[in-house]
Image (cartoon, coloured by chain):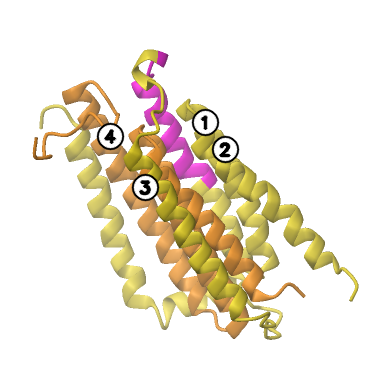
Chain colours: A yellow, B orange
């Protein structure tokens, strides 16, 4: 069985994605963690393109790597924590329990996926995952959740202002 | 053709990294970033299954997950700022007023 371009691209996106995700938890300084996370979002957008989710790939870059990470960096710089305030990460006994639990979850999930076998993808049409097709499904089948999202965002804006303001 | 289980295993790794970060990291801002990683792993799973089934409902759900993540980041970071203002720290180990001591 030959190696297809899709497989090459998958590994080209997957390996840096895991590396940058690991960089998020390896970094001590939140700015480095945020930068690793931005890079992870870009690699993940590449994976989304491989899954023919073109709209979601662009939303991922614009909303996540753009808007949400700017918010994170803004807060990091607003607090401007010193090295003393950041402190050293202490690995306590409870954290070892957490790490063991994480490895358990990972082994369980991966073994379940491996046992399910290599299931092939269905062939999809040309407009799968495009703005037109996803827009149509959002404004017909998922109209109510879509409108509820706008209420959620309004609540989040008001809530963020109320919580972060010193005196109301 | 890359089988769907590869994408699902990738999502599992991403989720595990985020999960480990939430459990181990001390800085509340980095804990939030790890929650974003876990949400992204869920999104990847939705999109992988959407591609496998040839149905676009997963795309709509992933769209809503991104909107919820934006709302969560806004409110969560506001809480981090409020905690820093009242306690002078963002370490999740030191903010323990609600804990039984």
Judging depth in this view, the residue of A14 and A51 nearest the camera is A14
Looking at the image, is mark 4 or mark 3 nearer the viewer?
3
Chain on which label 1 sits: A
Numbered label attached to residue A97: 3
Query: In the rendered image of this protein, does residue A46 appear above or below residue A132?
Result: above
Query: In the rendered image of this protein, does residue B52 appear above or below residue A16?
Result: below
Numbered label attached to residue B49: none
- Magenta highlight range: A65-83
Distance CA(mark 3)–CA(mark 2): 21 Å
Mark 4 and mark 3 on one chain: no
Labels 4 & 3 near each other (Cβ < 8 A): no
Chain on which label 3 sits: A
Query: Which is the main secondary structure of the residues drawn in magenta?
Result: helix
Residue that carries the numbered disc 2 in the rendered image: A23
**Image location (x, y in percent) of residue A130:** 62, 71
**Which numbered disc, 1 or 3, marks the residue that appears first in the sequence?**
1
Residue A61 in view (yes/no):
yes
Mark 4 and mark 2 on one chain: no
Residue drawn at point x = 39 percent, y = 58 percent:
B67
Mark 4 and mark 1 on one chain: no
Looking at the image, is mark 3 or mark 2 nearer the viewer?
3
Residue that carries the numbered disc 4 in the rendered image: B92
**Image location (x, y in percent) of residue A21:** 56, 45
Q: Secondary structure at mark 1?
A: loop
Labels 1 & 3 near each other (Cβ < 8 A): no
Numbered label attached to residue A27: 1
């Amino acid at each position: 069985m030959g190696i297809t371009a899709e497989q090459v691209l998958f590994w080209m996106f997957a390996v840096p994605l895991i590396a940058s995700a690991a960089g998020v938890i390896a970094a001590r300084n939140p700015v480095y963690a945020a930068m690793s996370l931005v890079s992870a979002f870009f690699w993940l957008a590449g994976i989304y393109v491989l899954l023919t989710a073109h709209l979601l790939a662009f939303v991922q870059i614009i909303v996540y790597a753009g808007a949400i990470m700017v918010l994170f960096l803004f807060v990091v710089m607003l607090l401007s924590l010193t090295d003393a305030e950041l402190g050293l990460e202490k690995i306590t006994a409870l954290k070892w329990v957490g790490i063991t639990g994480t490895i358990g979850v990972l082994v369980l999930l991966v073994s379940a996926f491996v046992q399910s076998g290599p299931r092939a993808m269905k062939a999809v049409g040309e407009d799968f995952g495009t703005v037109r097709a996803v827009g149509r499904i959002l404004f017909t089948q998922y109209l109510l959740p879509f409108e509820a999202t706008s209420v959620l965002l309004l609540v989040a804006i008001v809530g963020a202002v109320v919580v972060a303001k010193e005196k109301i | 053709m890359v089988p769907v289980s590869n994408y699902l295993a990738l999502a599992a790794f991403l989720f595990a990294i985020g999960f480990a970060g939430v459990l181990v990291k001390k800085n509340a801002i980095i804990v939030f970033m790890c929650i974003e990683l876990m949400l992204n792993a869920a999104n990847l799973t939705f999109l992988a299954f959407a591609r496998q089934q040839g149905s676009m409902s997963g795309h709509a759900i992933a769209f809503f997950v991104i909107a919820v993540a934006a709302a969560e980041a806004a409110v969560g970071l506001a809480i981090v700022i409020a905690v820093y203002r009242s306690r002078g720290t963002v370490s999740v180990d030191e903010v323990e007023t609600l804990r039984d001591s």
